[in-house]
Amino acid sequence: MIEHQAVEQAGSVDLYPSPGIQEVPHTKHLEIREGLPYPRGATWDVQGVNFALFSAHATKVELCLFDAAGKEELQRIELPEFTDEIWHGYVQRLRPGTVYGFRVHGPYDPQHGHRFNPHKLLLDPYARSHVGSLQWHDACYGYTVGAENTDLSFDERDSAPFVPKSVVVDPEFRWRQSTTRRRATPWTQTIIYELHVRGFTKRHPAVRKNKRGTFAGLSQKRVIQYIKSLGVSAIELLPICTYVVDRPLQEKGLTNYWGYNTIGFFAPDPRYAADPGNTLNEFKQMIARFHDAGIEVILDVVYNHTAEGNELGPTLSFKGLDNASYYRLNPEKPRYYINDTGTGNTLNLSHPRVLQMVADSLRYWHQETQVDGFRFDLGTILAREPDGFDRQSGFLKVCGQDPVLQEVKRIAEPWDCGPGGYQVGEFPPGWAEWNDKFRDTVRDFWRGESSVGEFVKRLSASADLFDRQGRKPWSSVNFVTVHDGFTMNDLVSYNEKHNEANGENNQDGTSSNHSWNCGVEGPTDDPGINRLREKQIRNFLATLLLAQGLPMLLAGDEFHRTQKGNNNAYCQDNEISWVDWSLANKHKSTVEFVQALTSLRNRYPVLRRNRFLNGVYNDELGVKDVTWIHPSGTEMNEENWKDPGLRCIGMLIDGRAQVSGVRERGSNATLLLIFNSSHEPVQFVLPPPVDGNAWQLQLDSNGSSRVGQVFQPAAPCEIADRSVSVFLMH
């Protein structure tokens, strides 16, 4: 019997001990039955394990059982039954911890899209856990590497010694009742904090070294307390599913650090576990701890492609299971893959079984691990049919009608590199979308390159893109920085990318950063430039957290995290990407500024309205929801909007405006936000309060001592150069 290592308890959940990796019972005692074609994957029922695997074109499927280390193949069992394109069988006496894989027989005919090769051990697409890592070897390929006819050749070497294996799991976990029945945070109250499981705690001084960079490390009390203190409501984790490190990267000493190279859609990667034998339970315990703190967990998921690459890629799972079903192939030359992802292949969500796999995966993460939502990488691809992006695609229909998936937060990255791939604002009701127009416009405004007319659209939740079909302002996920690109510190410190460490001669990553280094490229000892950079960071943070829509903050931006100018650190599992926690003390004032901003947002509902602002006077209520104010104190007119030199504008949000479909006045506070991107102070005449007698300064990104001071209307008030000010009607 294996002795179980105790997992540190959260004080709120109890774990069933994980069985760890188990030895297979002696083969002569195994009884094989036909089993059931559902559910997919390996399902333990105390008496044994049912295996069910989809393959429409296979001729035979063998289940391969391994020792606990995954090194020695102990037995091959032919799955005895084939029902509705599902191969299935039931093996008595197998239990959680059993290590297994598949060998699938069928035609090896790449010219017609088939790449079956039983010499290649394959991962179960539905496996909940994996053991071992990929050791790159030419045997991992279905064809003979170096052969004259390349992928048309056939390789007979066994790949089992070099590939990870699947593991049968016991899904049992004792969730607290309050955790399983918790209510979702309303979209209007959501503030997202994007982070990487490994990078966030790899250098965290309060996390023990053996837990740094893991689910257990992220769930430590002081880590969660810090995140909670920022005032955010959700964390968005970069991909945590099992992924593969590309061979060329590994040969350079680099890695797929971000994790956008998935090979297992149901399994958390054991590299993120302090105890790899208990990866799934450790992940669930992390979720439970965040839920105890009232913080939701959103997963970044990658259903657009797999780690198997193009026709010259390895055979690890889907390619050998049923290549012609799982992938979109060139209809004229099915030897080749459609590559709308830029990674070599594209999953075929037009196929019902592939679509089912994705939907099953989403339901699994939500129902079995209590994940609260998903951010869909290259989301446009998921909604593609053979003719392109389709708002009536099978995937979008599934999400729209499924009673389970309707409960979760669904966030799309609404673009890909295929034809017609840019679809910001085109997803159906119920979806939120990353809004890169907000990012680019806000960056340009604060470097003096954007008109106020374009800027106010982004402050207003980009109604020009999202205000249709009853969609709400939260449909626009606003961000200034994310994992992909400059950090906020680097945004104000570099004009150009500096990606030399990636080994691609600085050719990778975008050159369109909309950044301004404030006068010097990179770090400087010049106190004036450093003060300006800090002010610009505060301006970005204030714009992000005061704008209508759903804000998303990149972890570490609140204390000036830097990647030294690298805007594509996807392959950097080192100090370039890891959060440097010493900066949290150095830039404590910026952390406190973020806390002040989230406090304002949570305190004043007008900053997170559930209706789009339109600036139209409501005759019935005698109210205009938003009025744009010129520095002269008057409402902006057509001439003002056309002024290319205007760099300062006021946004008066009236708390009396209608807040729902009910035609009645609201009773919320009224705020005046003033944004000044000019390099000079502006004498701004404060407008008459709509239902009060004065204005009280609530926040000033310039760090003014005047916060709390009351100002009279119709008199000039100096607004500092490059600053954001928030006034409350007093």
Image (cartoon, rainbow, N blue to C red):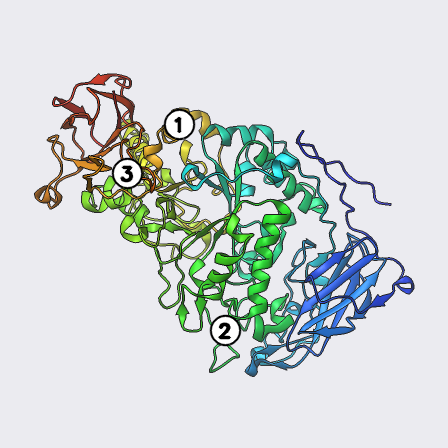
Residue 378 in the figure: left or right of residue 689: right
| Residue 155 location, quadrant | bottom right
The residue depicted at 34 percent of the width and 38 percent of the height is 609
From the top left corner, tell me how far across and down residue 237 is, in percent. 52, 45
Of circles 2 and 3, which is in front? 2
Looking at the image, tell me whether mark 2 or mark 3 is earlier in sequence order. 2
> For the residue carrying disc 2, how many other residues have a C-alpha within 10 Å: few (<14), some (14-19), or many (20+)?
many
Three-letter code for the amino acid on which mark 1 is drawn: Ser
Instruction: Say the numbered circle drawn on residue 520.
Output: 3
Alpha carbons under labels 2 and 3: distance apart: 45 Å
Residue 139, position as x, y percentages in the image: 67, 69
* Residue underneath mark 2: 337
- Labels 2 and 1 touching (C-beta < 8 A): no
Along the viewing direction, whichever of 497 and 15 lies nearer the viewer: 15
Return the mark for residue 599. 1
**Quadrant location, the C terminus:** top left
